Image (spheres, helix red, strand yellow):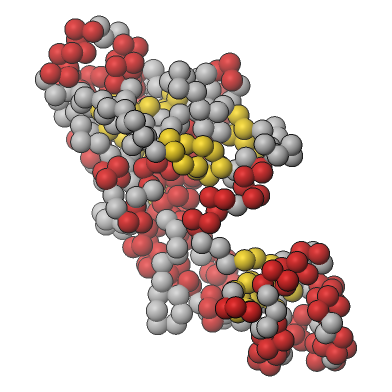
Amino acid sequence: MNPSAIPVLNPVDGHNLAADPARNLPLAGLRVIEFTHMVMGPTCGMVLGDLGAEVIKIEPLGGDSTRRLLGSGAGFFPLFNRNKLSLSLDVKQPRGLEIALKLLHSADVFSENFKSGAMAKLGLGYEALSRLNPRLIYVSHKGFLPGPYEHRTALDEVVQMMGGLAYMTGRPGDPLRAGSSVNDIMGGMFGAIGVLAALQQRYSTGRGQQVQASLFENNIFLVAQHMMQFAVTGQPAAPMPERISPWGIYDVFTVAGGEQIFLAVVGDSQWAVFCQAFGFAELQADARLLTNNLRVQARAWLIPELRRRLGERPAAEIAALFEAGGLPFAPITKPEQLMDDPHLLATGGLADMTLPDGRATRVPLLPLSLGGARLGLRLNPPRLGEHNHQLLLGLGYDEGEIAALLADGVIGAAEAESAG
């Protein structure tokens, strides 16, 4: 391990089924029960779990549907369901609901992201659970906060289209969703932030409360800078590919061998460093280019000229000069290449993980450190029903009762462990 690497708290321990308070994570001792699927709700639980909470994921007997997604959804389950326990349970059966309520009686947080009214029909709505456990914090992840749109079915792409983000991402006439589930992920993060705020308030009130996060309102927060640009300037924000750049050089350049590299020169001192590094003395002396605003006005001829001058240089050579001069640059990287990124490997940003089917991989950790340490992986993403037995024993069920629950289809059989 690189000696400069940031230490990682709580490496995977196959014998540790829950957050261990002795390990001193911020949320150790907190119990979270989640009825979630897809991305938004599971993200909230992942954040709380990474921070040390015991997160129990209650799944239908067939499992969270994201376990079986293909294509761009294939990574959803292993990413957003680490550091969790899995209980496969039919809550539509009275004995299944009884198990859920026993867990919730002493839980700190309940998290859900199903359609409005779905939890109430199961007997798990906010009013019922707050009577059962007045200290419970109930976080709901929805498409919209209560209002005229709340009846609509929302997806990340839906709110990106109606919330201005797809317009800003694509070219004029070609709205394009962002290349990640940004609203689902951020919506879950805001759900977790709401939980932390409610926990803090519970210290003084002794009571829990309902927290709501949503896709649409999250998307509006993302495009708020463009809304405020209009408020300040009176001019509508142009889509990002057509925007008027505030910087003279802020572009992707195609260079030797067809490689691409992003280069930025965002200030007058950086312009001087750039020109000196590349031997562009005449450009540095050009009165039309003396300030950033002048370079912005000259972009129509300046950028093609720089493309011509840089086009035959290798990307590695350009990167070395930019790095030596402290100038912003970036290779154009594909996601799979990040599995071997030297910075992530050296700083502990990737954790070793075992997928539910037994294969080994790496997974990115939360992008923060606490006390100089990264928040690590304590539990691999669980196999379906992996923790049924342990959790039911903890609730006081004996072996015979657990066997009867399994035989009657109240709980599911735990998935067999793969040899990998």
Q: Could you tell me if residue 319 is visible in this image?
A: yes
Q: Position of residue 256 (x, y in %)?
A: 64, 79
Would residue 269 be found to the left or right of residue 107 on screen? right
- Residue displayed at 42% across by 56% down: 181
The quarter of the rendered structure image containing the N terminus is: top right
Up/down of 226 relative to 37, above or below:
below
Up/down of 7 relative to 344, above or below:
above
Q: Position of residue 309 (x, y in %)?
A: 72, 86
Q: Could you tell me if residue 58 is visible in this image?
A: no
Q: Which quarter of the figure has residue 176?
A: bottom left
Would residue 35 be found to the left or right of residue 83 on screen? left
The quarter of the rendered structure image containing the C terminus is: top left
How many numbered circles are shown? Answer: 0
Q: Which quarter of the figure has residue 162?
A: bottom left
Up/down of 246 relative to 58, above or below:
below
- Residue displayed at 33% across by 46% down: 38
- Residue displayed at 70% across by 35% down: 372
Would residue 329 be found to the left or right of residue 63 on screen? right
